[in-house]
Each structure stands twice: as C-alpha cells, then as structure tokens.
Image (cartoon, rainbow, N blue to C red):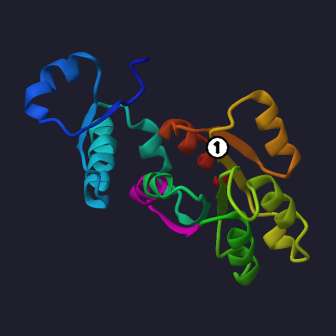
Amino acid sequence: MGEHVSIILMTAYDWAEIEEEARDAGVTVFCGKPMFLSELRRCLYSLVHTKEASGEGEAEKQIGCLTGRILLAEDNELNQEIAEVILEEAGFTVEIAEDGQKALNMLKKSEAGYYQLVLMDIQMPNMNGYEAARAIRGLENRELAEIPIIAMTANAFEEDRQEALKSGMNAHIAKPIDIGVLFEALEKILA
C-alpha cells in the first residue's frame, strides 16, 4: 500500500494486544467489532482528523468552501454510512436513495437547484445506475436533467468508466472511495 492510503483495521480482538504490530503494518485507525453505527462514525471521524493533523488532509481542506445537498444513490448500508460521514464532515447535506428508481423519483419531486449533485452507485436493485442516469438525462425539466452525476462504483475498469460517461454521467470514481479523489471530483464539478 502507498503512504497515502488509509488502512482501517476491523477486529474483535483487543487493540492493546496488537496495536504496535498493526501500526508497524501501516494501520491508520482501529475499529472494534461488532460494528455499530456509532463506532463506524468514530472511526471515520478519527481517520479524517488524523489526516488533517498530519497535513495529508489537503483535499478535505480545499473542499471546505463547497457546500450543498448531495443525492446519494447507494443500496449498501455500510457504503451509505461511509459516504454520508465523509460528505457531512466536509459540509454537505446528504439524502439517500436505496436504488436508482428512488433516486430518480426524489430528483423528479425536487425543485431545480435543491440537489447540487448525484453520487450514483451502478449495481442497485430496481433500476441500476446506468439506467437511472439515462432517465435523469431524459427528464423534461432541463435544469433537473443537467444535474451533475458521478458514478461511485466497484466497477473500476476503463470500459466501466466509458459506460458511465456514455449513460450521461459526468465522472467515475472507483470504490473503495479515495477521499482525495472524491473531493477532487466534487471540486472540479461544483466549483
């Protein structure tokens, strides 16, 4: 792993017994199991603030001037929580849709400008991210139809990126999410 990659260790073992070995192996933050929402939030908060304290948080600091409401289309609850914590820590308000159809419906019911951006998973039930992006681009309300959409997916090959762009998305970010890459894309699109 590179020096700019954060490693979160999730274990049911006592941290005190393995801390030195884990730190030597490059572990940044420790999260205990079983994993509760409060523990996940603590770990992510600790991770963001550890990077800021070490000077690695440049992207997080740069995004501070950007705010707004993001529609997150993601069916995995853990991924929802991680993205929500990261984005809210940066100053965004996040609303979550569990699938592409729900994201489309939420966007259609909103006024133009209510959401500044859609973060779209690809593999979701009911309507996948590609279908949702095409449906959004086909909306009659042009302001809603032109909302920026970023694919946020484990589908990380070049053909996946091309398919995301072909379906009308503005950018493609691979999972697991690199916070710096995410904030760079947000800044590029929203600035």
Left or right of residue 106, residue 41 in this image: left
Residue highlighted by disc 1: 153
User: In the figure, residue 139 lies in which quadrant?
Assistant: bottom right
Residue drawn at (38%, 37%) of the image? 57
Residue type at mark 1?
Answer: Thr
Question: Mark 1, residues whose alpha carbon is within 10 Å: few (<14), some, or many (≥20)?
Answer: many
Q: Looking at the image, which residue sits at the far left?
A: 16
Given residues 15 and 141, the one toward you in this image is 15
User: In the figure, residue 69 lies in which quadrant?
Assistant: bottom right
Given residues 41 and 113, the one toward you in this image is 41
Given residues 178 and 125, the one toward you in this image is 125
Q: Horizontal and vertical percent for residue 171? A: 73, 44
Q: Which residues are magenta?
A: 83-97
Q: Horizontal and vertical percent for residue 28? A: 28, 30
Q: Horizontal and vertical percent for residue 165? A: 83, 44
Of the 4 image quadrants, the one containing the N terminus is top left
Residue drawn at (84%, 41%) of the image? 163
Residue drawn at (85%, 65%) of the image? 135
Q: How many marks?
A: 1
- In this view, 184 is above or below 67: above
Q: Does the magenta portion include 85?
A: yes
Residue drawn at (79%, 62%) of the image? 132
- In this view, 77 is above or below 18: below
Residue at disc 1, secondary structure: strand
Left or right of residue 183, residue 133 in this image: right
Q: Horizontal and vertical percent for residue 136? A: 82, 66
